[in-house]
Image: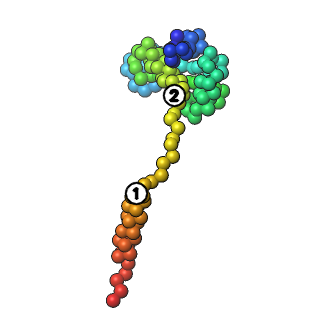
Amino acid sequence: MLQISHNVAIPDDEIRISAIRAQGAGGQNVNKVSNAVHLRFDIAASSLPELYKERLLKLADQRITREGVIVIKAQQYRSLERNREEALARLGELIRRVTATRKKRKPTRPTLAARKRRLEGKVRRGQVKAQRGKVHY
């Protein structure tokens, strides 16, 4: 059971985890031991609330396929169990990130002093550029 929030959790049977061989250097065990983890989570078939599903499917993330399946590959650690925990943590973080609501931006205007400073800076810059021209006698 992957706990997302105090009232939302994902049962273990909705998450498919398979062991695969990790890429890169691994010494003697590189061709013998499958210690990387491939996690697959189908958003549409899950028991998540509809709000979570909609936001996850709208998310522009390379880990989400067109079919609405989250695919996470964890191979950072040499232990299968630690890679499994890492993949589950990443899945939980992805779902938690979607649930956070952003604060609405309050539009502001520059102050009068800020507008004056901006215009003075533009005048100074124009004078510097004007001095770079040809010298006329």
Mark 2 vs 1, N-terminal side: 2
Secondary structure state at the residue bearing disc 1: helix
* Residue at 54% in and 14% down: 7
Residue 75 rendering spot, x and y as whole percentages: 45, 22
Residue at mark 2: 100
Query: Residue 134: which quarter of the image?
Result: bottom left
- Most extreme residue toward the bottom is 137
Query: Residue 99: which quarter of the image?
Result: top right
* Residue at 42% in and 54% down: 111
In which quadrant of the rendered image does the C terminus lie?
Answer: bottom left
Labels 2, 1: front one:
1
Residue at mark 1: 114
Amino acid type for the residue under numbered disc 1: Ala
Vertical position of residue 85 compared to residue 54: above or below: above
Comparing 93 with 100, the one in front is 100
Is 92 positioned to the left or the right of 134 in the image?
right
Is 82 positioned to the left or the right of 54 in the image?
left
Query: Residue 54: which quarter of the image?
Result: top right
Residue 102 rendering spot, x and y as whole percentages: 51, 33
